[in-house]
Image: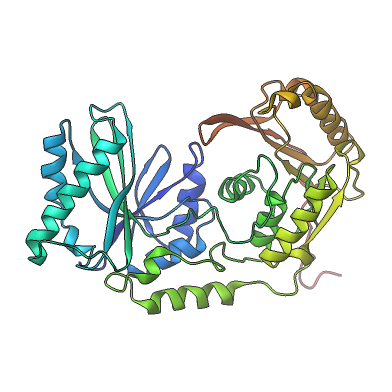
Amino acid sequence: MDGRYELIAPCHFGLEAVLKREILDLGYEISQVEDGKVTFFGDEAAIARANIFLRTTERVLLKVGKIKAETFEELFEKTKALPWEEFIPVNGKFWVAKANSVKSKLFSPSDIQSIMKKAIVERLKQVYHVEWFEEDGPEYPIRVAFMKDQATIGIDTSGVSLHKRGYRRLTSKAPITETLAAALLMLTPWNRERILVDPFCGSGTFPIEAALMAANIAPGMNRTFLAEDWKNLVPRKHWYYAHDEAESMVIRNLSTDIQGYDLDGQMVKAARENARSAGVENLIHFQARDVKDLRHSKKYGFIVTNPPYGERLEERKNLPEIYTNLGKSFAGLDSWSLYVITAFTETEKYIGRKADRNRKIYNGMMKTYFYQFLGPKPPKVKRQQEGKE
């Protein structure tokens, strides 16, 4: 290949614009934005840099092709026609790891996976002139997504999903993913100079992701990726360069005001341990504290939180009280802004005011809402004009 690839970055439905901005900031050209994914152009180095730097994608796929298939015979022939030898070496271990189908005639994931694997084997047998593949080399998991009979096919460069940064040792019962937390933080005007509080911090995802952003720590610095073993496609030097780039961008000796509260003392201990694992424990203050005790002397702060929303039956009866207490504490912070991700549809009623903005976001298969209650902007600091007394 000529070193110019199309890469596919999946994300939560409703957050494509955030991911697009991240990719543009890395310096890559956008090919297409669709529901739940952004496709972009990049070279060999982009595979390493996208995996290490992108905060809001679930994985990075190397696009092999896009085909239309309405029958299994058509799927077999068109899959076989793709240039698999440009991606998978003779000793590569390859399989169709994931297939999903929406509004398409072919809808059985297991059948799609089986037929595509056979087609790829047939193609590579002809190209490599072998009858049997040892498959004892690097792994090349293939993923296919059907939408209205159009199949987008890619090879997963990441391996374990990118929301697994490598720092979360302990979790709360219903944790928000790291990629979703990062994307929601990016939808707010918060920056490292401003206060951030999560009064339902659980295992600490919002405060930790905020601290990583504040210190400019790339999310993939402390983990490995499948494509690190793809010497046929991504020379090792690109991973070293990307790591060196990430290391050089970290802000040292930083002072922040990021806080995480939770009523459950065990969760607070877990959050501290996760922050320590992420290398940001000195940037966050965790405390066992009830939301109704939320107070702060500083102005123009941010509450960004994922309160309970009744996914478990026993929680539902407590929701009015929880959201009422959150609303009362927020009302006492008159210059602050509140951002709440929840599936609880009566959030505004119990917070006590209408949200200034509301964004629908799919957290997996669950429809949630990102309620945004905006406070006033802080006054701009006027700089003295040069030469003026």
Q: Give coordinates of residue 153: x percent, y percent.
A: 27, 47
State which quarter of the image contains the N terminus. bottom left
Q: Give coordinates of residue 351: x percent, y percent.
A: 79, 26
State how many labels appear. Answer: 0
Comparing 260 with 258, the one in front is: 260
Location of residue 375 with respect to 121 vertically, above or below: above
Q: Give coordinates of residue 349: x percent, y percent.
A: 76, 20
Q: Residue at x 10, y 43 (%)?
A: 77
Q: Give coordinates of residue 386: x percent, y percent.
A: 76, 71
Q: Residue at x 40, y 70 (%)?
A: 228
State which quarter of the image contains the C terminus. bottom right
Occupied quadrant, residue 316: top right
Q: Is residue 122 left or right of residue 169?
A: left
Q: Residue at x 17, y 35 (%)?
A: 69
The answer to whether residue 54 is seen in the rendering is yes
Occupied quadrant, residue 146: top left
Occupied quadrant, residue 94: bottom left
Comparing 79 with 97, the one in front is: 97
Location of residue 150 with respect to 262 vertically, above or below: above
Q: Is residue 229 left or right of residue 359?
A: left
- Look at the image and name its color scheme: rainbow
Comparing 342 with 299, the one in front is: 342
Comparing 125 with 281, the one in front is: 125
The answer to whether residue 151 is seen in the rendering is no
